[in-house]
Image (spheres, rainbow, N blue to C red):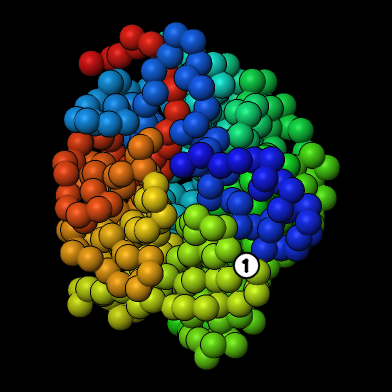
Amino acid sequence: MKYNQSCLKNKLISTLGISALALLGSQAALAATSNLNTPPNSQQVFFVGNNWDGTVTVIRPSQDYARIGVINMVPDRTARLREIYLNPVKLVAYQYIRNTAGEGNDQLVDDMYSTPDGQSVVASRPSFADVVSINIATGQINWRTPVEGFRADHMAVSPDGKRVAVSASSGNVVQVLDIKTGKELGRFATGDKPHENIFFNGGSRILNSAIGNVETSLDAPWQDFTKGKRFITIADANTYQIIKKIDFRPALDAVGRKDLSNAVRPVVFSPDESKLYAQVSFFNGLVEYDLNQDKVTRIAQLPGSSTIPSDRSKWVNDSRHHGLSISGNGEKLCVAGTMDDYATIVDRKTLTAGKLIGAGKPYWATQSPDGKYCVISESANDVVTVIDFETGNKMLSVPVGNHPQRVRLGYAPAGWSTR
């Protein structure tokens, strides 16, 4: 999809409301990856972050989606672990992350993007509480920047590729770094446990959603108050001043859904930039939110599995469903049913699910460069799977590393491979 940034900017300026700020998020993020000119001496690729083994599998972004190579994102693992074990406070935090969000494993690659020249990949490493830049060809570390607190989470890259925003989840801030040097350019406060980030409005705004305390076992509906402050924060990407906050709680209550969480997980936006489609904690479905009217307009309950534990504390980090993308023509949504072990294509007009594609704990969904296919990560099966948006059929699966999560479009050096 291509968007006229000038027209969008004019619309934003004329409206001066949260709807005009928030509605650009998904499309701007997609434009920042798929529509940039290919850097010289580079090839377009998909990066697949294998969170539990600390690698990034690089695959082709079309046709056979074959593996091109693997990048070790923790060449300094021994040094980092030594640093952690010599610091009692860091050690407690490290073990807590391992035993909660990590499900008994180190979290070593959460999110990643390539640098504008396509020569390096920048990744957030939750267990090491940092962001690191690795030269793809040499495997050497270019720079490393620790984040506030004890855990790094989702990131976003600016449309020009020069800045990367990272959620410091235990620090309750978003830090914006120079992607070339790792130097912090600014930060802004968020709700509890900031998660998703999106640059929008030509890179002049940043959207962050805070999901609250998902690692605790206080998951019964009556214990919702323990989850903390969960809302969307809109900040100026140049001054890092907060412009607006959006809390789904009043909007959900207004339509009689006090039972649903207001913790917003993955989001996408409609092509006309008027509606937001969101996954929220504990829910196997979608919430449609009208940004012009600031209200929930539809809620879609999607199929659920009978094998889901009745005890919600057994669910993975409060994520019933976690992974969402939209087709290039804007007519279909691709949903990763994380705890329900399926993916499905949802018609955006009716919000009804198509055929269910069996998948092992799918954790993310993204769009192919041409907008015709959805690519999901199956974290339990260690593969990525390609699904046709139009037919809803599974096309193929490709083996990757241990516990794939984020899948991002980017660039690698031309001719580079470790096969």
- Could you say which is closer to the camera, residue 86 or residue 249? 249
Q: Is residue 390 left or right of residue 87?
A: left
**Residue 337 versus residue 111 in the image, above or below:** below
- Taking the spot 18% from the left edge, 58% from the top edge, the residue there is 357
- Could you say which is closer to the camera, residue 270 or residue 41? 270
Q: Position of residue 255 (x, y in %)?
A: 54, 88
Q: Position of residue 292 (x, y in %)?
A: 65, 69
- Taking the spot 33% from the left edge, 9% from the top edge, the residue there is 415
Res. 92 in view: no
- Could you say which is closer to the camera, residue 249 or residue 333? 333
Res. 47 in view: yes
Q: Position of residue 351 (x, y in %)?
A: 36, 71
Quadrant hosting residue 412: top left
Q: Position of residue 49 (x, y in %)?
A: 39, 37
Quadrant hosting residue 244: bottom right
Q: Secondary structure at mark 1?
A: loop
Q: Is residue 375 left or right of residue 114?
A: left
Q: Amino acid at mark 1?
A: Leu
Quadrant hosting residue 175: top right
Q: Is residue 41 left or right of residue 181?
A: left
**Residue 415 versus residue 8 in the image, above or below:** above
- Taking the spot 31% from the left edge, 44% from the top edge, the residue there is 372
Q: Residue furthest bottom?
A: 256
**Residue 298 versus residue 46 in the image, above or below:** below
Which residue was labeled with disc 1? 291
- Taking the spot 39% from the left edge, 47% from the top edge, the residue there is 328
